[in-house]
Amino acid sequence: MGEASRRLALRAAAFPPSVGATLVTATRLSTPLAVLLTLNNVRRAFQHLRGRPWRHVLFLALSAWSAAEALFLLYITWKRRELDRMPLGPMWRALHDSNGPERRRANVERHLRMVSQIFDGGGAGCATTSPLSNPEVRLLLRETSGRSLDNSEGTFPFRRRYSVPDCTALEPVPAAGSLLPRSRSSMSFSRELGAGLLDALQPKHDHEDEATEGHRRRRFKWHYLSLHFIGDGLDPSHLTLWLRRHHLEQWVASYFFRGATLEELSAKPAEWAEMQGLVDAIIEGMEVPSLPDGANPAVRPYLRSDPLQQWWQHQPLWVFVGPSVALPMLGRITLPQMGFKRHRIGSMFYWHRLPRADVAPSHDIAAGSSAPLVFLHGLGGLGVYLFFFQWLSQRCSSDIFLPAFPFLHIAPSESRPSVRETVAQLQDMLAANGHKCAHFASHSFGSLFLGWMLKRSPYSVASAAFLDPVVFQVTNILFQRKLILDWPATLPDHLLRYFIFRNPFVLDLIVRSTIPDVSGLLPDEVTVPAVVAVASKDAIVLPVLTWRVVEYERMRRKLLQRTGARSAQEKPGEARAVWQPLHLLWFEDFHHGQVLFSRSACHQVFHFMRKVARHAAEAGEAK
């Protein structure tokens, strides 16, 4: 074979250069000839169809469409099976950080801390004492709950609502049934457990004794732990009757050891012993008595490695064409009219708008700071936010950067950048334009990237704005179960579930590529001035839980600021976070993403973005 290649190369070298130029010219002419042939065929087709009945034309159009749909069905089926066959362990290890024993222990402690924060607002330094048990915290809650506060400033008045979400006014919960995979009763199960969680959060009396509160706390933890398992007739109130230690070991191995199985860990004595220790820590943290050994064949843990095909529902070609082609084209046409220009840094494209001088100082989001504003979009791409960008551009005088993440466009895309890659690209984007830090705003799944920046590059973030965030509930198992298992109750929920969360690439992104211990963020880890906007009818997350953890973190900070208390266990970043403002906006009767299309709601968000930017500038964060 080598000798034949050598002879062929010698013969090719013997031809004059003019032969090569002729071949190159012929190759270049192939595309213009193909275009001319296509135009000629289209012209002949119109001539042939002229005078034909419209039914014949419609038949030909439907034939072409059906052929395209058939080819797309073959393609999407092949891609779906390819996603399910992809090894998960190496992918998780490649996408995310190293996962050693210390990190796994910290992740378990963080997970248990998140459960405590949902119940009673326990934050850093409050592991043993609930802030709710402190009379000053109860006084602060009474001061800010159940009434409206007028926070008007300058010439832009508005009212911010602090009304406590009514957990008892949720939609009726269907009766529990058999928990068969993909069945409606299985999907209703997570909603019933979610209602059980909310019920456990509600004190039955104003003055609850310690024993009653302790019983309610344990009931809440058992309901939460039950969310990690699927089976027939699982009653969270009788957790020890159906849960076995073997099931908890399976979940811990998959969740904290990046998709490992018990067979893989049993071959490594050190990791097996470590896994047993983590199981004991979870049993103790969840206040579960010792569980019997063995397995219950009617119960299995809910794992991220479960096949995606059981949740995937076919979507026609035109469903992909909208977010993949139409919305990006609309963005490319509209954004330049707002003054944005498209740039590239590494493998990431972004839009940049230069500073403008026609913004009123009283409304300027930048608040006189030279730091730019970076907006991190969610699912659907930048084309979904054009109204929001129009209003944002009118209220911000500094540079605006709009990074584009193609894997969030609900398009056939398997690219998943790592945490380090995304953070480095955002840092390079700022550095290439002469900035060291910026005010960051995010929406929905874009809050994951903002969480990465806060954890990996905190000094690049001057202030933060979270709109409809999912980052505070990624660690919560109810987040995935609500998106995948829960049965939609309203028309918007049905449409959102089918058109977005039954897409195989979105399912792969949420279930396989969103590692909770890496992507999750707790409110006490937000170490910069921040504002969080929550929609009361959010169909993606449970808004009550987001409101709860953020509101009680606000109360914890107020308590520490009032008393001047410090915990010896607080890290420097946590001590710094105590003095940072954390604003919470509750939008009553708003659905997920609705704030982006409400001018008045956007102006409320902009007002608080201006407040946190001004606080950061005064503190010297945004020089």
Image (tube, rainbow, N blue to C red):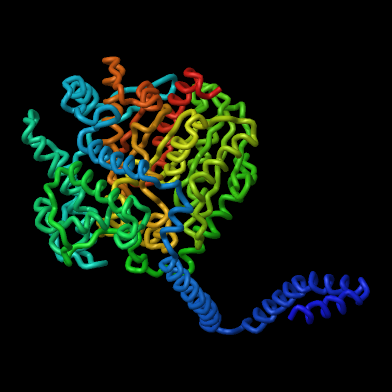
Q: Position of residue 583 (x, y in %)?
A: 35, 28
Q: Quadrant of residue 509?
A: bottom left
Q: Is residue 466 above or below residue 344?
A: above
Q: Quadrant of residue 6?
A: bottom right
Residue 470 appears in the picture as rendered: no
Q: Is residue 191 above or below residue 368?
A: below
Question: Would residue 297 be found to the left or right of residue 10 on screen?
Answer: left
Residue 601: image x %, image y %? Answer: 39, 36
Nearer-the-camera pick, 149 or 167: 167
Q: Relative to 453, is 134 on the left or the right?
A: left
The C terminus lies in quadrant: top right
Query: Left or right: where does residue 480 sit relative to residue 419?
Result: left
Please state, as top left, top right, bottom left or bottom right, where the N terminus lies in the image: bottom right
Q: Is residue 268 above or below residue 215?
A: below
**Nearer to us in this view, 175 or 244:** 244
Label count reads 0
Residue name at image x 27 percent, y 46 percent: 542
Residue at point 32% right, 45% down?
475
Q: Is residue 473 visible?
A: yes
| Residue at figure coordinates x 55%, y 60% from the top left | 325
Q: Position of residue 497 (x, y in %)?
A: 34, 58
Q: Is residue 237 left or right of residue 550?
A: left
In the foreground, 463 or 331:
463
**Residue 324 percent across, percent down from the top left:** 52, 59
